[in-house]
Amino acid sequence: MRRVRVIPILLFSEGGLYKTVQFTKPTYIGDPINAVKIFNEKEVDELLLLDIEASRKNRRPDFKRIAEIAGEAFMPMGYGGGVMTIEDIKQIIFAGFEKVVLGTSAIEQSDLIRKGAALVGSQSIVVSIDYKANLFGKLRVYVRGGQDSTGLDPVSYARKMEDQGAGELILHSIERDGRYTGYDTILIEQVAQAVDVPIVACGGASALADFSLAIQAGASAVAAGSIFVYRGKTKGILPNYPSQDELRTELFTKLQG
């Protein structure tokens, strides 16, 4: 049975951590370094740090701050938000991140993916496909924090990103973000059948069972935010992560069966 990565997503802005619902209504939840230290103790597979305001405000990454955060991590980390140039990619890798996540720039600068893959390897270049239904009910890819539609459907866009050199794709449902409604397994399956690179499912996870469903649909890894930072019905802020025994039971045992 292949190793399944389970990845907490930390949403970052102005030095702090936030949680959103459908990419809106950001709620402050704490300090990123404290969260990273807790996840170190939980033996997390991987972390993603995403700046939720950088692309909207046309702002470059805060390299000093993200280097401080990466310096505390004992697990691989990816960073996304405001990455606009090949020099940005270099600095992010130099800061201690293993992966660079491209969103808005992936479509606005068509050669950045290919140049980045040539520089640091395609395995380190990840494209986030943020999508939702438009007014006509058609799924479309959105950029700038979910504000602007590209007019492209997620499946064809995924193929395009793979062709340009992306080594991994994050399939992020804007409508399910923070809603605890489960992953979009239908689209996960469609994209998995269309591309050969790994897919990270994101948006909507409510329980460990959702992880298994996403993997069964074709995802190579699962990512989530709310269930890893909130606890209980009152949504108390407490970074948490399943034990290795829980993951083994839910992912490995069930998927093998």
Image (spheres, grey):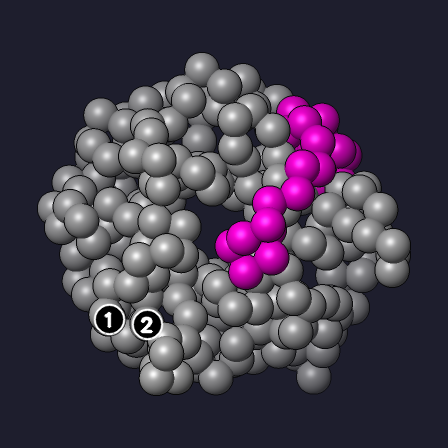
Any part of residue 67 in sight = yes
Q: Residue drawn at (55%, 24%), measured in percent from left and top?
A: 15
Q: Amino acid at mark 2?
A: Arg
Question: Is residue 125 highlighted in magenta?
Answer: no
108 relative position to 173: left or right: left
Residue 2 spot, x, y in % from top left: 55, 65
* Residue, disc 2: 140
Q: Quadrant of the C terminus?
A: bottom right
Residue corresponding to mark 1: 152
Counting from the top left corner in percent of width and height, residue 249 is at: 78, 68
Q: Relative to 218, is 167 on the left or the right?
A: left
Check disc 2: other Cα within 10 Å, few if <14, some if 14-19, many if 20+.
Answer: some
Q: CA distance from mark 2 to mark 1?
A: 5 Å
* Mark 1: few/some/many CA within 10 Å (<14, 14-19, 20+): some
Q: Is residue 39 magenta?
A: yes
Q: Which residues are magenta?
A: 20-43
